[in-house]
Image (cartoon, rainbow, N blue to C red):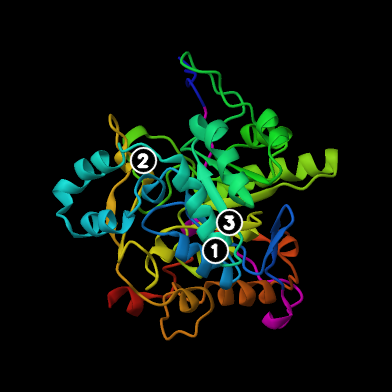
Amino acid sequence: MSRRLLKELERSYGFDEVAIVPGDVTINPELTSTKMSIGECTFEAPMLASAMDGTVSPRFAVMMHEMGGLGVLNGEGLYSRYEDPYSILEEITSMPQSEVTEYLQQVYSEPVKENLIGQRVEEIKSAGSTCAIAFTPQNTKRMSPLAVEAGADIIVVQSTVTTARHQSRSYRGLVFSEMIESLSVPVVVGNCVSYGVALELMETGVDGILVGVGPGAACTTREVTGVGVPQVSATLECAAARQDYFHRTGRYVNVITDGGIRTGGDLCKAIASGADGVMVGTPFAQAEEAPGRGYNWGMANAHAELPRGTRIKVGTKATLKEIMYGPTSVTNGTQNLVGALQVAMGMCGAYTIRDFHQAEMVIAPAIKTEGKYFQLAE
């Protein structure tokens, strides 16, 4: 008797399962351009620091600007809840692991102070830096105008999973097209992992989408809910939506791979898969200048009923400049990330990020282990 399965499953791939094929033409790395733009804001490095309290403070956002990237401040984090968030940060990073989730739930139950939103934006802008600030969908309508009024350049609307058709009994869902019309700055929205959702979000007028559900080192969404798609496949899906939308409308929307990026190789594979930039948390949390002092934690870690993150000890490895541009003596790919991208682009003959989207990729499950016996044995 033949049987029919309830559903057929597609194979999806993460960074460790694919490789980039060198091009037929090569160029010197210094001839490549790694620039990306969001609205009128242009960045020399296609890297955003995640809106995580252990990663981005107002001061760190300023430093990201100085390095050519973009630091995204969590508009509903400790910096907008407390006049002095640094004493709270010290507590978070010093207490035992067994106590930290309960403490996070406690400190994040403090209401957001609307005046602090504007104050933190002004701290970043007063240094001459581009300011991006993130809010959850349920609070965006109320809080984003406050940030824009204070001078924010980019609004990020971010939750674990975001769609253009969210339904709720408790409130009228956020209508992105209405919000975008009411704001005078670019809007980046996330997170999503599929062609259909990405396309619908683009049609609302957003300037960028964040790709990724649960890949971050401090995120436990995949373990808690079973929901997520590996980042290479997710990026390919959303990039396909971007291309179809662009060909139909002539309007280009940035695809930003968010999470799961640890090394230069991961960064390069994300861009080759169609990303215009990447959002990075833990690698930046390892910077000497990061506010988490060698720790990082997921923003859903403090959820009152279903925590979906954990505090992780990432250590302090190098300065922000060394992580982004070197110089470095580390050989595992975790430093000089922009340099790695330029070398990979040169190997593929790609002058620009969009050129690099055309690089050929292959499924290669042995890419990290082939011939590496002695490295793996150490």
Q: Earlier in the sequence, mark 2 or mark 1?
A: 1
Question: Compared with residue 113, is residue 61 higher up or lower down, i.e. above or below?
Answer: below
Q: Residue at x 40, y 71 (%)?
A: 289
Q: Secondary structure at mark 2?
A: helix
Cβ–Cβ under 8 Å for marks 2 and 1:
no
Of labels 2 and 1, the one closer to you: 2
Q: Which residue is mark 1?
A: 267
Instruction: Give the side of residue 340 with respect to residue 255, left or right.
Output: left
Q: Which residue is mark 2?
A: 300
Residue type pointed to by label 2:
Ala
| Mark linked to residue 204 | none
Residue type pointed to by label 3:
Cys
Q: CA distance from mark 3 to mark 2?
A: 23 Å
Cβ–Cβ under 8 Å for marks 1 and 3:
no
Asked whether 364 or 237 is in front, the reply is 237
Instruction: Give the side of residue 309 with respect to residue 183, left or right.
Output: left
**Residue 328 place in picture, x, y as percent:** 45, 84
* 132 is within the stretch colored magenta: no
Q: Earlier in the sequence, mark 1 or mark 3?
A: 3
Region rendered in magenta: 8-32
**Residue 40 place in picture, x, y as percent:** 74, 56
Q: Which residue is mark 3?
A: 131
Residue 69 visible within the image? yes
Q: Tell me which secondary structure the magenta stretch mostly adopts.
A: loop
Q: Residues within 10 Å of mark 1 (few under 14, many from 20)?
A: many
**Residue 116 place in picture, x, y as percent:** 44, 47
Q: CA distance from mark 1 to mark 3?
A: 23 Å
Q: Residue at x 54, y 78 (%)?
A: 325
Question: Compared with residue 308, is residue 277 higher up or lower down, i.e. above or below?
Answer: below
